[in-house]
Amino acid sequence: MTTIDIANASRWFGNVVAVNDVSMSIGPGVTGLLGPNGAGKSTLINMMGGFLAPSTGAVTLDGQPIWRNEGVYRHIGVVPEREAMYDFLTGREFVVANAELHGLDGRAAGRALATVEMEYAQDRKIATYSKGMRQRVKMASALVHEPSVLLLDEPFNGMDPRQRMQLMDLLRRMGADGRTVLFSSHILEEVEQLASHIEVIVAGRHAASGDFRRIRRLMTDRPHRYLVRSSDDRALAAALIADPSTAGIEVDAAEGALRIQAVDFGRFTGLLPRVAREHGIRLLSVSPSDESLESVFSYLVAA
């Protein structure tokens, strides 16, 4: 079993703290690294892949430090998010180049290209590839030496639905075979479909850890804020405020609406239409005012 351990790792660039005292363990199976854009996911993956040294703390592979330890590259494959590639090469030439770095030949490159179903375009220049095709040839390059650990940074960006399903199936098979697969995403539904385990990072901090059902429950159970417009805002506020599902109500005269904080999501969603009907109040609009990923993840940090 191959495991990456991150122990109290931080990484800063000048005065900017990208990763702040993060500890987690990534083992066999498929793990999703979830967080909003700019949360520090890429920095963490770069430390796990040996491209960045932690400013403090340690990142190890089966107890061995990853930074400046060329032996670990026999076991790690990395698919970076960045687009920079050698566009003047064909897809096959690109994968063969990485195979040769590992002391392998064109047969290994051919197997990797077949794994990601890129044989049909292997002799075309990378400059002619779509973003999804570039993602797949990067994947082939990372798989050429059959690593036990695969790190992918936003791998589904730019892929069409068919390509996305093919890659998900491939990663599931790798996880089922006992490989350690970690991929980052800012889309919860994407992670739910694939990962057996989720690590959440927000603003460089480790916010939550567990299976996706636990993470989803934390998100659902958090306080929710709504902007509600009705035919009689004051009467509606008076009827709602006594219920324990409602923590606070503010009349926003400028918006011509109520700002409501609900602490029991399930109860409140049933309460609102029932109270409006009982008091003869028409609901004109009901919209969440805090549904951005940043607000959801920020709640997890404090949870």
Image: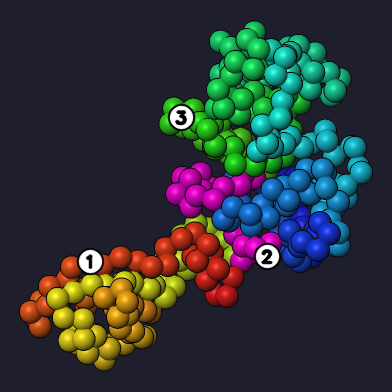
**Residue 162 image offset from top left, x and y in percent:** 44, 27
- Single out the mark in the foreground, 3 or 1: 1
Instruction: Compare residues 75 and 99 and report the one nearer the observer.
Output: 99
Instruction: Compare residues 124 and 106 and report the one nearer the observer.
Output: 124
What's drawn in magenta, residue-wise? 182-207
Question: What residue did someone put label 1 on?
Answer: 285
**Quadrant assignment, res 21:** bottom right
Instruction: Compare residues 185 and 195 and report the one nearer the observer.
Output: 185
**Which SS class for mark 1?**
strand
Report whether 228 appears left or right of 29: left
**Which SS class for mark 2?**
strand
**Residue at x-position 73% and y-position 52%:** 44
**Residue at x-position 68% and y-position 55%:** 40
Instruction: Compare residues 80 and 68 and report the one nearer the observer.
Output: 80
Residue furthest to the front: 254
Magenta region includes residue 202: yes
Looking at marks 1 and 2 on the same chain, the residue that comes earlier in the sequence is marked by 2
**Residue 302 image offset from top left, x and y in percent:** 57, 75
Whether residue 57 is situated above or below residue 151 in the rendered picture: below
Question: What residue did someone put label 2 on?
Answer: 205
Q: Is residue 153 visible?
A: yes
Magenta region includes residue 189: yes
- The quarter in which the C terminus is drawn is bottom right
**Residue 290 image offset from top left, x and y in percent:** 42, 67
What's the amino acid at mark 2?
Arg
Report whether 136 appears left or right of 11: left
Question: What residue did someone put label 3 on?
Answer: 160
- Give yes or no for contact between labels 1 and 2 (Cβ–Cβ under 8 Å): no
